[in-house]
Image (tube, rainbow, N blue to C red):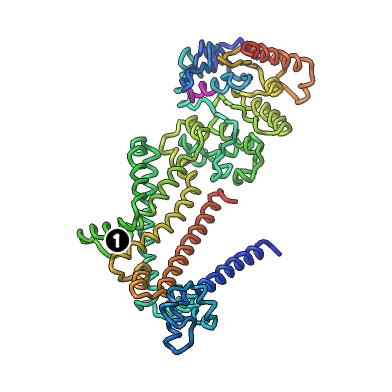
Amino acid sequence: MNDGFKAFWAVLTVLAVIVVFWYAACIPMNIKGVLTEQERAGAEVQPPSAKDRRDMSEFGLVLNNSFAIPATWEQDRPRLPAPHQVAVEMWETTVQKKITSKRSLIYHGWVTLSATILGFVIGTGLGVLLAVGIVHSRVMDLSVMPWAIVSQTIPIIALAPMIIVVLYSVGIQGIIPKAVISAYLSFFPVVVGMVKGLRSPDAMQLDLLRTYSASRSQGFWKLRLPASMPYLFTSLKIGIAASLVGAIVGELPTGAVAGLGARLLAGSYYGQTVQIWSALFAAAILAACLVGLLGLVERKVLKRMGMAQ
Amino acid sequence: MNTESTTQPVIEARQLDLTFQTNDGPIHALKDVNLTVDKGEFVSFIGPSGCGKTTFLRCIAALETPTGGTLTVNGMTPDEARRNRAYGYVFQAAGLYPWRTIAKNIKLPLEIMGYSTTEQNERVRSVLELVDLEGFGGKFPWQLSGGMQQRASIARALAFDADILLMDEPFGALDEIVRDHLNEQLLALWARTEKTIGFVTHSIPEAVYLSTKIVVMSPRPGRITDVIDSPLPKERPLDIRDTPEFIEVAHRVREGLRAGHADDE
């Protein structure tokens, strides 16, 4: 067996364990609701009194009513939906819906993705500029860096509504406020990574440039910037994931109009757990794709630069 | 060596002093250093760590500023000499940029100094030939062995044709066989280019094999304890190291090092 094959089986095994655990968890999580439904449908459940059942542990109920186990995986509004229910919901809201439909996950995913990308671009640009300033100016190092750190200690969930309200009051709405929140989250890893990257050339490298009487800008373009590339890509991968979180959080206070955040919020309003979980998975898949895409670009760029073998 | 010539010395240090201010108090890195290096000489600086040999080389390169005395390079201050591209510097590590090919690495100083592209290509070709790396210009540093990388870094220092080559333990990180080979090549290169070379090492055979002048230094404070003008001929095959003359010079260097050490131990 070659390594790729082994890795494939390892991934599959982990996935299988998670799925088995998930199905098992659905049984105690959903048993009370299922028994209430079954009782209404005329089945005999143990104990028969709803009040007694409420005081019993979920595991006791499962032991007494093992006939009801399959039903815990088929509820309309389960506490915890089973994997196949989420999969079916995702299938129906992606492949089987028109992209323009308000119930299409692809439509909502695109709304979130566009804000994510805009925010990521703004955040990355800002992060790189700040890092360049911090590396070249002692004043900026002392004055900007503490604020950049403080900015990340404020919970974004508290800050997001304020950003939206403030921007709305000056007439800005739609994608921009969400992108601003995305940028707010994604600039930080870029600043930290780029500062480290731009400072990564050692004393010998800097001395070498001094022996050529190189100017500061020559030092930047010929040494510091290329040397920072591996650091930049690591930061970008963290930044794009943070951007997605920012865009989703930015969709929550706007009244749940569109986007994956809106799907999450609407799902929790109406107890649509299956919808919540499918939106969560859509966000996770989107994040994985974005990070994967950046990883691909990273490999290509570094290989072209001769920095990866 | 023709010492009768009236040309000015290439490097001249008079009463040179350098004290570093550190948190643990001042460190006297160089004290009363007097040295004259003439054009075309191969000067080795040898001594235990902390004796100031690297610091002295860095002073010549204007990477450190002496706190006392005078130092001239080609009759100028070290700073002016640097701006006039008086020297190429080779560090202990090759320090090639991993994102540049060997040819592009050698072009780095030429780009910074504003040479035209045709001139750059011409010089890269000629220095690659000089260090025996023809055909490796398109390779990335990681594709070369440590010895080849160090040769490429020597080529980079030679690219802008400075009269002086300053080398700070350039072969210190390489194994003995590679080192012997590079020493031989360096002598051939020196004979072809007639450059003045300042060479820091802590290997006695290396210093004796390469140099026309050996400067023995000792630490705390860093100072020169002996300057030995080598009686060996300019033509030096590797087996010159078994001749009585070679062994005698090596012995004198060892004595100088021991004398410097006896003071504080």
The quadrant in which residue A32 appears is bottom left
Q: Position of residue B201 (x, y in %)?
A: 64, 24
- Residue A246 in view (yes/no): yes
Q: Nearer the viewer, residue B82 or B44?
A: B44
Numbered range of the magenta stretch: B57-64
The quadrant in which residue A114 appears is bottom left
Q: Is residue A6 left or right of residue A15?
A: right
Q: Position of residue B174 (x, y in %)?
A: 67, 33
A34 over B147 or under it: above or below: below
Q: Which residue is mark 1?
A: A176
B59 part of magenta stretch: yes
Q: Secondary structure at mark 1?
A: helix
- Residue B44 in view (yes/no): no
Q: Nearer the viewer, residue B60 or A57?
A: A57
Q: Position of residue A292 (x, y in %)?
A: 50, 61
Q: Name the residue located 38 percent from the left edge and 49 percent from the top edge.
A: A127
Q: Position of residue B69 (x, y in %)?
A: 48, 12
* Residue type highlighted by circle 1: Ile
Q: How many marks?
A: 1
A104 part of magenta stretch: no
Quadrant containing the N terminus of chain B is: top right
Quadrant containing the C terminus of chain B is: top right
Q: Is residue A293 left or right of residue B153?
A: left
A72 over A12 or under it: above or below: below
